[in-house]
Image (cartoon, rainbow, N blue to C red):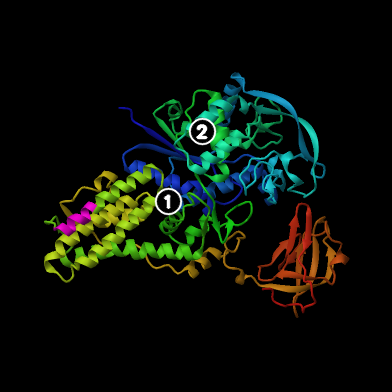
């Protein structure tokens, strides 16, 4: 009998900023849950991941922070590791694409494709910024999406509709650094002949049974439109060098998925990629679907020796108050902040309950409060009641008694739930599986209420023992979801290291150890305050709009800041008090145009120095492409008036 091996991956996070809850729920956390389940079942499974550290997003972010790309990558690699550890996400390896091993694997892969006739060169038109004096790789350009019309679409992909883009397709393109409109110039690039694998790729996708519906539908639709030759080169320094094309590096979406191969090789399991008994399982967000169902499989087919994905699990977006959680858009709750405010298992439970499997999910503070209190009221309450019965009635030692029909029905219910949960987990229906486990805890609470062991002496032992059996089952079934709490339950029961198949076994004796309540009621206001607490870096405030102190201000004086081309120094009357603001408006307004204007000012910010000017607030402006316009009031109103 062939032993199946599971190679589990999650989409590689970029190091252009902190991990946020969208990253966790979109791929990192579900992959952890699935791998933990497999291991609990005794399956041979590894979970590989790492940071995607090349590409224009990192360069753009580094430039904005005044850092070299490597410095930014080092900074966020450490912060990503801390966030993963904080959320108890355990990988066999969390590596980086900037290692020498990765460079070699990528270049070797490229040579295989070239030997197989899939690589060619041709001259293309590419955007060039005359202000910045350089060619603009994809994410240096933004504009309007030609497919859905979304503003701020990037040069490689639209975040709203998920369509991959070519920079020249963007409507009203502009350079993300200086906001100027770029011009087209010719340059030779390296291409992967993706259309050559279209027939084989289409057949593989259409017959595939392990893809989520959204992934399969998107891939089929994309391939039917006709595959285009894929430019796999970029004119920049930061990236894996193309060995036979001086001055060019590989496109990040060519080198990043090859990272899965690199990281597996670093574990000494490179052979897994060439063995048919390996099940390759990808977890990803919907914005990565095309890369994992079309581009990377196309590369694997062209290479000819590596396995193709067995499962592709793609999730929709997690939204917060209606906005997609996004680093690039600045709408996010950082994972590090979240786990400092509330224990990891509370977040894991709530996020997995909100898993956006079929459609986007709007995650709210109210939902977090509801789910964390459910964790306390349903699961925590049952466990604590059961352990208290064992301590109070039997001095912590409960031997197996003779069970009545009611007890045996409860034991049978455990067996039924275990079977259903196992089936859901194998199908990667994680939210369904978690719901089944919580349902078991609810039924067990109902069983206690119905049997009333505190009133019936003859029922104390059988009911307590049955509940301890259910508690053991809950601990094992919950281990993939809330591992820290699960381990505590097993420790309290004196049953450490129990596996999945141990659930159905009726223990001869329970010896209860010292215990305390697992969870507590959560006050969301306190969670918000902790998340909003300022650390060493500037943070986005996540509380509601009412926390912002917005006022009408009149510009009393405006002047240029010496040595700064873009900065203006404004003196603004906000109602009996004058504030100094530093604003990057010199390109859009002359100082005299601003004096006397009534503008909107955010006044409850800590002062920040910009080019020697202490800015004591922030004005509001609207941006469209390369144009910036101040937000003003349309009727006369006193300075200092509150904005609501």
Q: Position of residue 478 (x, y in %)?
A: 34, 52
Please tell me whether residue 273 is drawn above or below residue 167 in the rendered image: above
Q: Inspect the magenta stretch and tell me whether residue 409 lies in it.
A: yes
Comparing 563 with 415, the one in front is: 415
Q: Quadrant of residue 42?
A: top left
The local secondary structure at tag 2 comes to: helix
Q: Nearer the viewer, mark 1 or mark 2?
A: 2
Please tell me whether residue 258 is drawn above or below residue 573 in the rendered image: above
Q: Position of residue 100 (x, y in %)?
A: 56, 32
The local secondary structure at tag 1 comes to: loop
Quadrant (top left, top right, bottom left, bottom right) of the N terminus: top left
Inspect this view and state whether residue 171 appears: yes
How far, Cα to Cα, is label 1 from label 2? 34 Å
Q: In the rendered structure, which disc, 1 or 2, sits on the residue that comes first in sequence? A: 1
Disc marking residue 624: none
Q: Position of residue 240 (x, y in %)?
A: 62, 33
Q: Quadrant of residue 402?
A: bottom left
Magenta segment's dominant SS is helix
Quadrant (top left, top right, bottom left, bottom right) of the C terminus: bottom right
Q: Which residue is mark 1?
A: 88
Q: Residues within 10 Å of mark 1 (few under 14, many from 20)?
A: some
Q: Inspect the magenta stretch and tell me whether residue 588 lies in it.
A: no
Q: Which residue is mark 2?
A: 205
Which region of the structure is painted magenta? 404-412
Q: Quadrant of residue 121?
A: top right
Q: Is residue 120 left or right of residue 286?
A: right
């Amino acid at each position: 009998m062939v032993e199946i091996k599971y190679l589990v991956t999650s989409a590689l996070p970029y190091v252009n900023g902190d991990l946020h809850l969208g990253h966790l729920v979109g791929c990192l956390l579900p992959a952890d849950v699935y791998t933990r389940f497999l291991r609990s079942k005794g399956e041979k499974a590894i979970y590989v991941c790492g940071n995607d550290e090349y590409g224009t997003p990192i360069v753009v972010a580094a430039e904005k922070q005044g850092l070299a790309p490597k410095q930014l990558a080092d900074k966020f690699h450490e912060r990503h590791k801390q966030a993963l550890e904080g959320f108890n996400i355990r990988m066999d390896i969390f590596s980086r694409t900037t290692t020498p091993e990765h460079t070699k694997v990528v270049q070797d892969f490229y040579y295989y494709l070239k030997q197989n006739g899939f690589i060619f060169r041709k001259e293309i038109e590419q955007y060039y910024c005359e202000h910045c004096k350089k060619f603009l790789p994809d994410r240096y350009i933004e504009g309007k999406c030609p497919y859905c019309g979304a503003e701020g679409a990037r040069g490689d992909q639209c975040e709203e509709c998920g369509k991959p883009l070519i920079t020249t397709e963007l409507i009203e393109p502009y350079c993300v650094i200086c906001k100027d409109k770029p011009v087209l110039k010719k340059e030779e690039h390296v291409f992967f002949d993706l259309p050559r694998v279209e027939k084989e790729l289409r057949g593989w996708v259409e017959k595939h049974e392990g893809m989520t519906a959204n992934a399969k539908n998107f891939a089929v639709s994309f391939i039917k439109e006709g595959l285009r030759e894929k430019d796999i080169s970029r004119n920049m320094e930061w990236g894996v060098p193309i060995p036979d094309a001086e001055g060019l590096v590989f496109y990040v979406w060519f080198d990043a998925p090859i990272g899965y191969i690199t990281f597996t090789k670093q574990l000494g399991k490179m052979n897994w990629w060439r063995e048919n008994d390996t099940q390759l399982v990808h977890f990803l967000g919907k914005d990565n679907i095309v890369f994992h169902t079309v581009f990377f499989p196309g590369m694997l087919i062209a290479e000819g020796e590596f396995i193709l994905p067995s499962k592709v699990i793609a999730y929709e977006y997690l939204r917060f108050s209606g906005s997609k959680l996004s680093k690039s858009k600045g709408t996010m709750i950082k994972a590090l902040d979240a786990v400092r405010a509330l224990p990891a298992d509370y977040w894991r439970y709530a996020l997995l309950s909100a898993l956006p499997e079929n459609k986007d999910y709007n995650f709210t503070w109210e939902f977090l409060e509801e789910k964390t209190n459910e964790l306390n009221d349903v699961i925590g309450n049952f466990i604590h009641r059961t352990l208290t019965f064992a301590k109070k009635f039997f001095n912590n030692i409960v031997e197996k008694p003779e069970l009545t029909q009611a007890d045996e029905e409860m034991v049978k219910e455990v067996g039924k739930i275990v079977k259903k949960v196992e089936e859901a987990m194998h199908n990667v229906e994680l939210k369904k599986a978690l719901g089944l486990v919580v349902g078991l805890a609810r039924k067990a609470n109902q069983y206690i209420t119905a049997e009333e062991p505190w009133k019936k002496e003859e029922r104390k032992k059988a009911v307590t023992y049955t509940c301890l059996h259910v508690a053991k089952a809950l601990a094992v079934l919950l281990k993939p979801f809330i591992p820290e709490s699960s381990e505590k339950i097993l420790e309290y029961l004196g049953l450490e290291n129990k596996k999945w198949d141990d659930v159905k076994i009726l223990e001869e004796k329970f010896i209860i150890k010292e215990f305390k309540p697992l969870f507590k009621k959560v006050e969301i206001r306190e969670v918000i305050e902790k998340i909003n607490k300022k650390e060493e870096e500037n943070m986005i405030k996540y509380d509601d709009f009412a926390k912002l102190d917005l006022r009408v201000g009149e510009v009393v004086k405006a002047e240029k800041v010496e040595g700064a081309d873009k900065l203006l120094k404004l003196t603004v009357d906000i109602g009996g008090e004058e504030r100094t603001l530093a604003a990057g408006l010199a390109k859009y307004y002359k100082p005299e145009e601003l004096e006397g204007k009534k503008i909107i000012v955010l006044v409850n910010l800590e002062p920040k120095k910009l080019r020697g000017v202490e800015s004591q607030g922030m004005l509001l402006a609207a941006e469209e492409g390369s144009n910036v316009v101040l937000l003003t009031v349309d009727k006369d109103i006193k300075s200092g008036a509150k904005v609501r």
